[in-house]
Structure formats: structure tokens, C-alpha cells
Amino acid sequence: MTSADNVYFIVTEKHDIFSNIKPGCICYMHKSQHTAASKKGGSPSKLKVTSLDSYTPIAREVDLSSMRALSAEEAGLLLALPDASERLNWFMQRDDLQMAQGLTKGTGVTVEENGKKLRGIIRYIGKITEPAYPDPISGTFFGIELQGEHRGKGQTDGSYLCKTLFSCERNCGVFAPFARVKPLVPSSLSPSTPEPFSQQQTENLTTGDRVTYFINDILHHGMVVNVDQDYVWISTDTDENGKTGGEVRLPLECVAKEEVPAETMDIDTPPVETDSDDLFSVDSVVEVTLPAGNLYGIIRWIGTLPDQGPVMAGLELEEDKGVNDGTFRGKRYFYCPPKRGLFVRLRSCHPDSRFQSISANHSEKLSKQEDTESDTEQSAGMLEAVPPLSTDQVNQILIGRMKGIQGHCNSCYMDAALFGLFSCSSVLDSMLFKSTAPQDAPIQKTLLRDIVNPLRSKGFVEGRHVMKLRQQLQKHGYSGSFTTDEKDPEEFLIVIMHHILALDPLLKLSAGGKVQESYCYQIFLDQNHSLVLPTVQQLLEHSFHSAGLKLAEVPSCLILQMPRFGKKFKMFDKIIPSLELDITDLLSEGPQQCILCGNLAEEECTACFKDSVFSQTGFKVFCKTCSSKVHSHPQRRSHQPAALDIPKGYLGHSIPHTLTRDKLELFAVLCIETSHYVSFIKYGPKNEDWIFFDSMADRQGERDGFNIPEVYTCPEVGMYLEMSPAELANQVPRDMKGVAKRLFCDAYMYLYQSTNMCLYR
């Protein structure tokens, strides 16, 4: 049975106090039954209909006067609203329902998400779940790909319940019912709309063109963002309400092309003292002074434009304050998002002054001096590693404002990761010195000379050095947005460790006799776990248990990603940091001790892993004697212990009760809150030996200012580490002292090291 085989109704009045068919319920009956009822009684007063809102699909008689007919399309749209009374309210507002029926794929819309209106384009219209048997239809939803500044504020990549309905980048998609979706452009123009523009005026419109258009008899101006068959998207100078920054979608015949004013493309500001033509190259970070204020961006192209005499620079701006997407008069010179492109004279550019508080000219001279000195040192063989900061050095070198790594333009994910890896640990220093391909050597050099060494020797890294690293990564082609967009730390680390420096995989996992290699491990838990306030030790063990994994060898560095659904949705309100990870039982090879008597373990029981009788941590391994006793209990007779692989040298021998256990120590934690990454460092042996780093803790100035990074001690963390799980569970996050809440509640990634194995890497 299909949706077309039925007729649909919405109940508008309560007809029976004992019935569960309430106002707002959607009901249906087969067309043949409806036809038969009409023939039988002429105009029947009641119809036998089935409610789509009932768990028991039983047909009931409902007064026809209490229902209104619906089309199958209207029924689907209304079914997407879960509340019956809300459906009825929207049904009574017929204009919105009719407007929703006119929406098509490719239409620009706003969608309400978490109380905010986001801009996007419809990519999918239809059901997201199958109808519950025997219902003929389910709710109709709109799949929307968010655009511009609203990208990344969604919750999907176009998939719902593991089924791909449309494709977009992660967290750039939204599924919403019609009630939360509105077109960017009114459904129709005013009847008094002026005559359409001539074909000559509208032909060959391209992205970046300046245009004139009419809405409600009022003349407007704007810039073409996109041309979609017979329609054109326009970024408005001012909309019908006099506000700036909006977008409209209009038929081509309602738009007239006009030339981009020469003054927009040829901004003439006083040149800086230095010769900009020599100073800047593609990928330089610059600012341009305009009458309305300073604009900041990256040079993507340098050359001459048609009818433009001086050397020009094509800029990709940080904000949507440009006039194109890298095109000029229909020809593309570089790529960038719409409204981010701007062409200016090269000599109008000067260095981005926000990276440091000193003047731009002095900064450039200082930078050149540092580069000269560093090159001299390297040619003389003097470029060596600066060791990580010791416990005593942290307070002398690293603590204070303008310490750590200076953040700039969505760099917090990289700042936090670099600070966590290199400030107080040498576990991955091998990547700074290993031989690498010639084309990758500049990245390795930047990482060592401009970031790691200054961090360890001076306690501060200017933001321009991290931007230089981001530019180099972007040039390699791994992502076209390394210099502008926020990313995940693991994405950056994998690019650096695997693609650039070809570091051997940090992690080797054994599963079913096969070894898998990786750089990070994402913790996943099965749905039946009983963890409420877990430690990292418990999370790792439960994840390995559910996936049937073992460690093929002791890792020198273990990077663990906490169980989350994206950046926003945490699986646990709090996670207790394990200062040490005991991985002895997680190794696929090596002797293990019986958890009861301490003798050589010969069997492992996965069914005993979650048994509350045993310890909450550790895999459950037994000698044969203890295994026999444990599994003689009626509740465990169905268990099936498996034999362990015992090293040959231990067969037939007992092992000492003081068997050396393999442990990893925690040295850093990356946390995220409201899309901003920070890091905690365990810099000493005591529980209170913690420091907190934020690359954007404060800011000097507004648009033309700069970020102030800060590092400070947070001994309060130790107080919470010493609490019992019950005490910690009762702590209200907002009342926790200092920054402890962020460590316990916002953990994104844990970094562990083996002080023994890192010596061999």
C-alpha cells in the first residue's frame, strides 16, 4: 500500500472523550473504502479512519465534521511535527503549509536550530525513517546544507541513522520539519513588480558581478553569489528592511548586471615604508586599511588584472566582507568562499599587526633578523633540540600572560595539540629529527625552529609561526582551509605524523590474529555498558573488550579520543583522569597473573568482565584451578573461558607474584568547550602538578587587536583527583574550583607516554 492509495484527514475537534484520536492527529482510510462509504450513504456523517499516531492501528468511526481533508503531501509535512496540537496550529496557518509545498531542492532557506536561524540550501526532501507497519507514510523532513558562516553548526553530514540521504561536510547538515524552515526570498514578488530586465542585461551573470534588482517596486544593489539555472543568488548591500549582509534568490529576468566600481577593486591606501612588492608573496598574511576599517586576509594571487595598471593582490578575507569568490569580470584567479575575495593593489597591503603588540615594521625586521640568525646557526650545525621543560623550569619559563602559543584565526585546535605534545614531554621528539623527503623538510624545520624550540626556551611562540605552519600544510593540499577553519586535533596530528613526516604508527592493535596500525584510538562503547562515572582505565578496557582488541606491543605514545558524538555531545558528564594506565592485561603477548591467586593465568573469560563480583578494572584471567572454581557457580556455568597464549618460557612454570606491569603515564589532556580547545599538562609527580593553557585567554583591541595566550598553574585539580568516585559524582560542575571543571567534564583527548619505550623510537 502506497501513500497514493489513501485519503488523509487531520482531526480538528475532540469527538469522543474516550477516544485516543485527539485534535491534530493525522488519520487515513483506503480510497476504495472512502468511495464505498460515499456511495452507500451519499454524504456520510462518519468515516472509519485509522490514526497514524496510535500504537494500535485500529480503525475507528470519527465524525466527518471533526476532520478536514489533507493531501498526501500535506499529511507528510504535518507528520514531521511530533506534537498533535502543534500540527493543528500549523494546519490552521495555511500559508506556511502551502509555502512549504513550494520548496524544492536547491532553494535557499533559513532553518531554526537551537533557537538560532541558520542559512542553508535544501538538499533533500522526504522521509528520514520508514513508516511504522502498517502505516502508509511517515513524516516529510527537509535536509539542509548550511552555508557560509553557519557551516559547522549542524549535527549531521547528511546521514540519519547510518543512512545517507544527502552529502555534505561533517556538522554542516540539518534535518528539520517545515515549521522551522523559511525561504530566503518571499514566495512571490509584488503584483506591481516592474517589467523584467532585457535579456542583454541579464546574460552572462557570474559570481562576483555587481547587479541591480527590484523587490516590491524598490531598487536594490548587490553582488552575485551563485547562478543556479534560471535563478541568481545575490548578496545584498541592503535588504528591503534596510539591513546589510543578507541574501536573496531571484529569477534571472529580475536582475540587471552592472560593472564593479573601479574604486572597490583598486583601493589606494598609503603604502608602508617597506617595498610591499618585494615583501609579500602568495600565502602572506596581510591587512588592508579601508575607510570603514581594517580587513585581514591571506594573499592567494599576485599579478595584473585587465585594464588595471599596478600589480594587484587577490585576498581571501577572514570575514564575509569581500565582493567575490576569486573571480574578476568572469575570469577566475583563485578560489575562496563567496564574499571572501577582494582585489587590491599589492602596495596597499601591509603585515598583519595582530600577531604581536609591537609595530608591524619592527616585527618584520625582527622576524628577518631571527630568520638570518637561525639560518646561520643551522648552516653551522648549531640547530639542536631544546629539551622539554622540567618540573622546576615550568614556573620560571612557562607561567604567565603572553606565554605558550599565541592563537589566531581558529588555530586553537593546533595550539592546544602542539603545546600538549611538546612543552613538557619528549615522547614524539623523534619526528623533529627523522629523515624526511625534501619537499617536507620546511615543515619539519618550522615545527622545530619556530615552534618547539622557542616554546621550550622562551615559553612563548608568536601566532605568525603557527600560521606559517598552517600555510605550509595547506600548500601540500591536504586541506584547502588549514589557514582559516577550525579542525579537530586528530586531523592535524595525523597529517603531520603520517602524511608529512611519515612517522611509524604509534599504535599496533591485534584483532583476530591480524595487526592493525593507527596513530590515535577512538574509544567506543557497546550499548550495554554500565559505566556512570568512568575512569580512563575503565573506558579503554571496556572499548577493547567490546571490540575484541589487544595491544600487539607497548606503545611509546597513546593518544585516546574520548567517547563523544562530535564536539558537542558527550557520553559522560564527567570522566576521571587515570594518571597511570595499566595495559598489562591489554597486551596480546606476555605472561599474565591470575586475578585471584596470582599464579600464571591460563584462561580468560570475557563473560566475567562485567561481573560485579570482580574488580571494576582489568580483564578477568585465571589459572585453571581458579577458573574451575569460579565457573562452578550456577550463574557462571554457561561461560566459555578461552585459553591464553602463554610464552614458551613460562609453560609449566610458576611466575613471581611481583610480575612487572606495563604502565603508561598521563602527560596531557586536550579539552573542548563551545568549539574552543584548551590543554592541561601534568608537569610533575604530585597530584597538584598541573598547568592550564589557553591560546586565546584574552584579547588586546578589537578587529585590529591580537590574542593574548596564558599559562597558569591549577593545583585545585589535585583536590578532585583525591576524592572518592561518590564525592566526585556529587560535585556540581559550575561550582568546581578554578578550571577543574574543564578537565573532568570537557575532556576530548588524553595523551599517555611510556617512559621506557620512547627511548627506542
Image (tube, grey):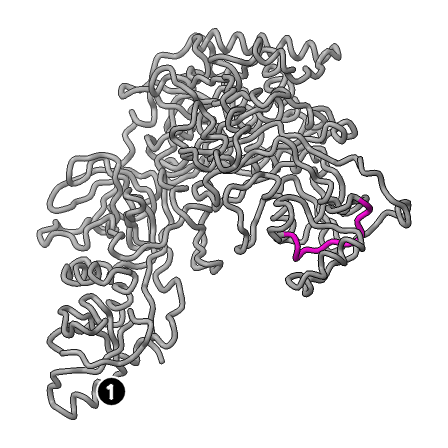
Q: Is residue 17 left or right of residue 436?
A: left
Q: Nearer the viewer, residue 674 or 703?
A: 674
Magenta segment range? 599-609
| Residue 374 in view of the camera | yes
Q: Residue at x 47, y 60 (%)?
A: 163
Name above or below for residue 433 compared with residue 148: above
Amino acid type for the residue under numbered disc 1: Gln
- Which image quadrant: the C terminus? top right
**x then y, percent, for residue 479:** 53, 38
Q: Residue at x 20, y 61 (%)?
A: 85
SS for dot 1: helix
Of all residues, the one furthest to the bottom in this rendering is 40
**x then y, percent, for residue 707:** 42, 19
Name above or below for residue 480 compared with residue 445: below
Name the image quarter holding residue 586.
top right
| Residue 480 in view of the camera | no
**x then y, percent, for residue 310:** 41, 21
Q: Is residue 355 left or right of residue 15?
A: right
Dominant SS type (magenta)? loop
Q: Which residue is mark 1?
A: 33
As for residue 604 lying within the magenta part, the answer is yes
- Which image quadrant: the N terminus? bottom left
**x then y, percent, for residue 622:** 76, 51
Q: Nearer the viewer, residue 578 or 627?
A: 627
As for residue 511 lying within the magenta part, the answer is no
